[in-house]
Amino acid sequence: KSPSPAAAEAKSEAAKSVKIGIYFATWWALNVVFNIYNKKVLNAYPYPWLTSTLSLACGSLMMLVSWATKIAEPPKINLEFWKALFPVAVAHTIGHVAATVSMSKVAVSFTHIIKSGEPAFSVIVSRFLLGERFPPAVYLSLVPIIGGCGLAALTELNFNMTGFMGAMISNLAFVFRNIFSKKGMKGKSVSGMNYYACLSMLSLLILTPFAIAVEGPHMWAAGWKEAVSDIGPQFIWWVVAQSIFYHLYNQVSYMSLDEISPLTFSVGNTMKRISVIVSSIIIFRTPVQPINALGAAIAILGTFLYSQAKA
Ligand code: 3PG
C-alpha cells in the first residue's frame, strides 16, 4: 500500500531537515578549522592581504580543476552574469580582506563578536539607503546587538582600532554583498556552488593588484623565510589548510543558501560564530573577563531576537 500524501510529505520534510542539519554542521566545522589555521598563520606571518588572496586563489584553482575533470558541472554563464556579479565581488573582496586584517590585529573571538552585529548593519542600510521599513520589534532587537557589541569592545583586553574597524567594515561590506547577491541571483540557474566559485575568481582578480600595492612580494618573501624558520615546514601546511578550508566553508554556506531562506541562513551564521568564538578562546587561551563575555552573550542574544522579530 502506498503511503498517504500527508505521510509522504512528512517524510520529505524530515529528509530536508536532516539535509540542512548536515549542511549546517559541516559549514560550522569547516569554519572553525579555517579560523584556527588562519589565526595560526597570521600570528607567524602578519600579511592578511596575501593570506586573503591565497584563500581566493586556492578556491578558484580547486573549482577550475573540478570543472575541467567534470567533478562539478561547469556553469553556463555569459557576460551579463559577470556584470551582475561584479558589485557582489567588490563587496565580497572588501568584506573578506577587512575581516582578515581585523583578525591579524585582534583575537579571533573579538572579530567574530563584532561580526555578530551584522544584522544591525543590515537594518540600518535597508532603512536609510533602500527606504525599507521594519516592525518596531526589529528596531528594538538592535538595542542588545549594538549595546552588547559595544560592551564587548569597551571591555576587550587587547582592543585595537584597526582590528575593530576591520570587523565593522566587513559587516558593512557583507550587508551590501548579500543585497547585491540577491539581485544578481534572481532568475539565474547557477547553483550555489558554482555561484561561489565565480565569486572567488572575480574577487581574486580584484584583490590581487591591491594586495601587491599594500604589502607586495618583498615583504611577503622576507616574512615567509622568517615564518618557516620559526615554525618549521609545517607552516606551509597551515597556509594550505587555511586556504582550502576558507573555500570549503564558503562553498558549503552558498550550497545551503540554495536550500534555505536568507533568514534561516543568518540564524545559522550567528550560531556558527558561537562555535568559532568558544573554540578559538579555548585553543588560543584568549583572556576574557566576565563583563566582556557578558557583552558577547547580549549581542548574540540580540541577534536571535532580531531573527525572531524579522520572522
Ligand atoms: C573572511 O575572511 O572572509 C571572514 O572570516 C569571513 O567571515 P564570515 O564568513 O564568518 O562572515
Image (cartoon, rainbow, N blue to C red):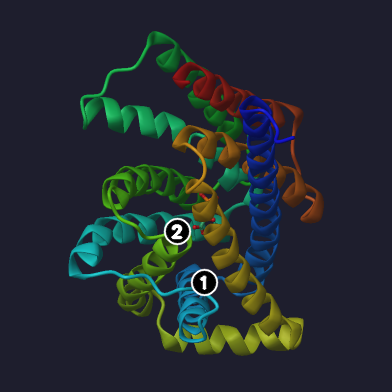
Q: Secondary structure at mark 2?
A: helix
Task: Please identify the quadrant where the N terminus is shown.
Answer: top right
Horizontal side of residue 48 vs 12, given as left or right: left
As rendered, which of 272 and 253 lies closer to the eye?
253
Q: Amino acid at mark 2?
A: His
Q: Amino acid at mark 1?
A: Ser
Query: Taking the image as drawn, is residue 147 in sight?
Result: no
N-terminal label among 1 and 2: 1
**What residue did someone put label 2 on?**
96
Q: Residue at left 58%, top 72%?
A: 243
Specify whether tag 2 is near ligand 1 (CB below 8 Å).
yes
Query: Which class describes the residues within 10 Å of circle 1: few (<14), some (14-19), or many (20+)?
Result: many
Give coordinates of residue 121: x percent, y percent. 38, 34
**What residue did someone put label 1 on?**
55
As rendered, which of 217 and 55 lies closer to the eye?
55
Quarter of image, res 215: bottom left
Specify whether tag 1 is near ligand 1 (CB below 8 Å).
yes
Q: Residue at left 26%, top 46%?
A: 183
